[in-house]
Amino acid sequence: MRWIVIAIALLALLVVIAILFRARLLASNKLAFSCSVRPSGEKRWRHGLAHYNGPMLLWYPVLGLGMRPKLIFSRSRISISRVEEITSQIGSIPEAQIIDLISDQPVGDKSNKWQLALSFGSRLGLNSWIEAAPPGGDKPGFII
């Protein structure tokens, strides 16, 4: 019985170490930023990190072991329809800005309308990234 308790404790410790290592690895990307997401109309925020990868915005949840993004937004298929500044904190983002992001196709398995909570600087970076679509490529999203 004692060995089972020790084995479970060691397994739990390994899982915690793996989660921390994954979070550190994702955060080490210079193009990563804190970003909470939720499908439009839902109340619960999912906290995570997003980063730019060419024409894709990849979003990873903070907690988890997988190295694959949970959400992938294509620059040529998204637009920002609304920006709202709030004074409260969402996750690790103080004075977050909430944007309504619309995709012309469903993202993940949920919705084509998402809300993102991010800092002012991260929102400006997202605006620039959307507008920076290459000439002759698909048109970038309209930014308010």
Image: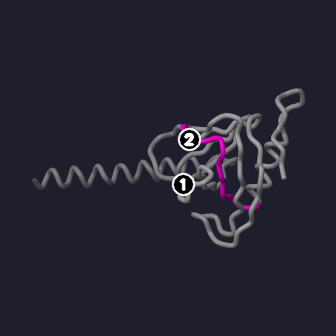
Q: Is residue 56 left or right of residue 6?
A: right
Residue with the mark numbered 1: 46
Amino acid under label 2? Answer: Lys
Q: Is residue 128 above or below residue 93?
A: above
In the image, 130 versus 17, the foreground residue is 130
Label 1 element class: strand
Asked if the stretch drawn in magenta spans residue 113, the answer is: yes
Q: Which residue lies furthest to the left in this view?
A: 1
Q: How far apart are marks 2 and 1 (CA)?
A: 13 Å
Residue with the mark numbered 2: 110
- Part of the protein shown in magenta: 109-120
Q: Is residue 53 above or below residue 90?
A: above
In the image, 51 versus 42, the foreground residue is 42
Residue at image location 54% in from the left, 54% down from the top: 46
Q: Position of residue 14 (x, y in %)?
A: 35, 49
Q: Position of residue 98 (x, y in %)?
A: 70, 59
Determine which quarter of the picture holds residue 118: bottom right
